[in-house]
Image: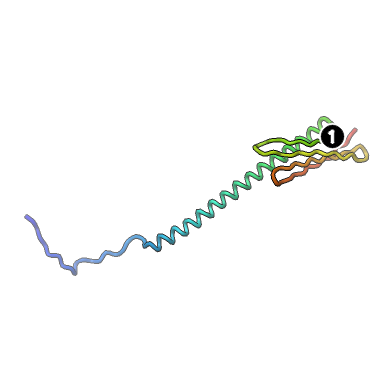
Amino acid sequence: MILSRKINHEDIVPCKESGFSLVELLFALLILSFGLTALVKTHSIAASTLNNSQERYHAMRIAQEFIDYALITKELISVSEKIYRNKVWYKVTQSIQHRSNNQSQITVDVNWRKSQLTLTAQIHSH
């Protein structure tokens, strides 16, 4: 048996809209895209800073190695050479200045890409 009931239009409650409008979605996407763009830019800057720090670290190690070698061997000669380390070419120039009272000054310049580092040490000769 089929039950039938008459539908009274006054009993129907209009459904409230749920969800988001197209304008709200576009505005949310705009804000999200600005946030993601800022995040990518920040990541790029951080990666570049890390790379520069690593290159400076290697330049400092190279300069210190040259000074340590001169201190240990007492070979006070001027040197210029290129060293390849960590996928970067470093141009190293070591110069010696002899001073009075058995003193010498070693200066090591390390150049790479568009950067430069200079390290200086005093040596007392006997």
Disc 1 secondary structure class: loop
Residue farthest right in this picture: 101
- Residue at the (54%, 51%) spot, across then down: 40
Residue 123, image x, y percentages: 85, 37
Residue 68, image x, y percentages: 78, 34
Describe the colour scheme in one phrase.
Answer: rainbow
Q: Quadrant of the N terminus?
A: bottom left
- Residue at the (70%, 46%) spot, across then down: 114
Residue farthest left in this picture: 1
Figure check: 24 above or below 111: below
Instruction: Say which of 46 and 83 sits in front.
Output: 83
- Residue at the (73%, 43%) spot, across then down: 111
Residue type beneath disc 1: Ile
Residue farthest bottom in this picture: 10
Residue 33, image x, y percentages: 48, 56
Residue receiving disc 1: 77
Residue 67, image x, y percentages: 79, 36
